[in-house]
Amino acid sequence: MRKIKITQAQYDTILLREQLNRPSKEQQMILETSKEALLGIAMLAGVKLSGQNEFIANKALKEPSTMSVIKNTLEDKSKTDELIATMTERGFSDPTSLLSTNADKIKDKFNEISPNEKLDFISITNLKELQGK
């Protein structure tokens, strides 16, 4: 094993870069919530998940906070566009068609599962408009 001598300034630079590259707890929670919401939406749309993804999706669909994120995502066109981009990055084939074709199924399952939040015509209209894109 070799020892390398570095200056205090070099050491501080290394630590600073490490801290900047590490997501904050808030950012990490947003990333985890986004993943849970994405998998929850996929499950609501009828995508067959397995293993860890299925576990995460089932857990997400039982969490009121995640259900709120899902509702907000489906009702906001810009968030829905971000969802589609993320789904494409993660390897979903044609997520636009998946969401627009299964809009009614997503709404019905969401409303059945969620005791507090309910999807309405705004989310259905938003999802069905995806087909034209």
Image (tube, rainbow, N blue to C red):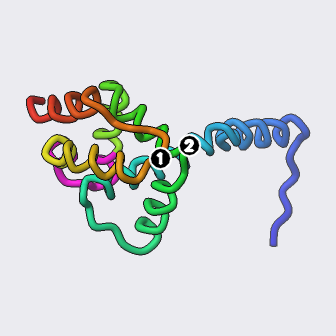
Q: Nearer the viewer, mark 2 or mark 1?
A: 1
Quick check: 41 above or below 59? above
- The disc at residue 115 is 1
State which quarter of the image contains the N terminus: bottom right
Q: Which residues are magenta?
A: 87-97
Where residue 23 sits: x, y (%)?
65, 41
Where residue 12 sits: x, y (%)?
84, 37
Residue at 33% x, 58% y is: 43
Quick check: 60 above or below 51? above
- Residue type, mark 2 in image: Ser
Real-space CA distance between mark 2 and mark 1, rounded to the nearest whole angstrom:
12 Å
Image quadrant in which you'd find residue 39: bottom left
The secondary element bearing badge 1 is classed as loop
Q: Is residue 91 magenta?
A: yes
Q: Name the residue tied to disc 2.
A: 65
Residue at 81% x, 67% y is: 2
Q: Is residue 56 magenta?
A: no
- The disc at residue 14 is none
